[in-house]
Image (cartoon, rainbow, N blue to C red):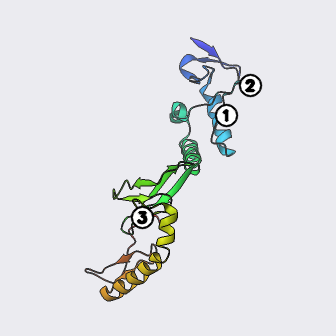
């Protein structure tokens, strides 16, 4: 059975047609691929239905397999960037972890558990969890603590003959081998 594509006005086999899930408009795969490719190449992360005045959006997951690989990857990257840019980012404050964590923008989260090291920290202050003390009180009480800790850490590193990684500035200890340091954050 053949269907008419409203864009190229050609009758196409039903298997060569693409139906948009949200509005049920149907167009040939070639027209959808050209439409999506043009939108993505022009920097859009959201692709609208091809029908005139239709507010529906084409779902990435419904059509990415029929797209050229580079267009599918570019669209996926654009969607990830949009998602990631709307999130607030915090870093686990523990020096032996420092994993990046995204929080919902505008969320008033204070106590947060790191998904990697499972230690609690304050997402507002980005310091280890300060139970029973407000963020303002903590900042007032411990404003000199951070500088003191840095001095103590440098003194300990000097005593232990630790070196800093030139890329991530984490202290490392030579156990064996040459003096070459390979950063544990390869893509840093």
Q: Residues within 10 Å of mark 2 (few under 14, many from 20)?
A: few
Decide if residue 72 is on the left or right side of residue 173. Answer: right
Between label 2 and label 1, give the one nearer the viewer: 2
Residue ID for mark 3? 98
- Of all residues shown, which one is farthest toward the top? 1
Look at 44% across and 61% down and name the residue there: 133
- Vertical order, 140 against 130 (above or below): below
Residue at disc 2, secondary structure: loop
**Disc 1 element:** helix
**Residue furthest toward the right?**
53
* Residue for badge 2: 53
Residue 172 to residue 84: above or below = below
- At x 54% / y 32%, what residue is drawn? 63
Q: Residues within 10 Å of mark 1 (few under 14, many from 20)?
A: some
Q: Position of residue 185 (x, y in %)?
A: 42, 66
Q: Quadrant of the N terminus?
A: top right
Whole-percent x and y of residue 62? 52, 30
- Spatial CA span between label 3 and label 1: 42 Å
Residue 182 picture location, percent across and down = 38, 74
Q: Is residue 90 above or below residue 9?
A: below
Quarter of image, res 12 = top right
- Per the model, the C-alpha gap separating discs 2 and 3 is 48 Å
**In the image, which is nearer the foreground, mark 2 or mark 3?**
3
- Tag 3 near tag 1, CB within 8 Å: no
Q: How many marks?
A: 3
Q: Is residue 46 above or below residue 169?
A: above
Task: In this rendered view, identify the residue nearer to me: 107 or 31.
Answer: 107
Question: Which residue is tagged 1?
Answer: 35
Residue beneath the point at 39% across and 66% down:
94
Instruction: Name which of mark 3 and mark 1 comes first in the sequence.
Output: 1
User: Callout 3: helix, strand or loop?
Assistant: loop
């Amino acid at each position: 059975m053949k269907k008419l594509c409203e864009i190229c006005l050609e009758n196409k086999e039903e298997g060569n047609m693409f139906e948009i899930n949200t509005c049920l408009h149907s167009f040939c795969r070639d027209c959808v691929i050209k439409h999506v490719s043009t939108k993505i190449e022009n920097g859009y992360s959201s692709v609208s239905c091809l029908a005139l005045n239709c507010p529906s959006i084409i779902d990435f997951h419904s059509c990415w397999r029929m797209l050229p690989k580079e267009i599918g990857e570019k669209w996926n990257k654009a969607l990830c960037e949009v998602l990631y840019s709307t999130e607030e980012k915090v870093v686990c404050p523990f020096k032996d972890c420092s994993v990046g964590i995204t929080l919902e923008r505008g969320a008033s989260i204070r106590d947060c558990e790191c998904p990697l090291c499972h230690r609690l920290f304050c997402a507002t202050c980005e310091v280890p969890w300060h139970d029973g003390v407000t963020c303002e009180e903590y900042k007032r009480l411990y404003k000199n603590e951070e500088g003191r800790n840095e001095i103590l850490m440098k003194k300990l590193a000097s005593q232990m003959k630790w070196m800093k990684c030139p890329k991530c500035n984490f202290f490392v200890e030579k156990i064996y081998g040459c003096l070459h340091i390979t950063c544990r954050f390869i893509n840093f």
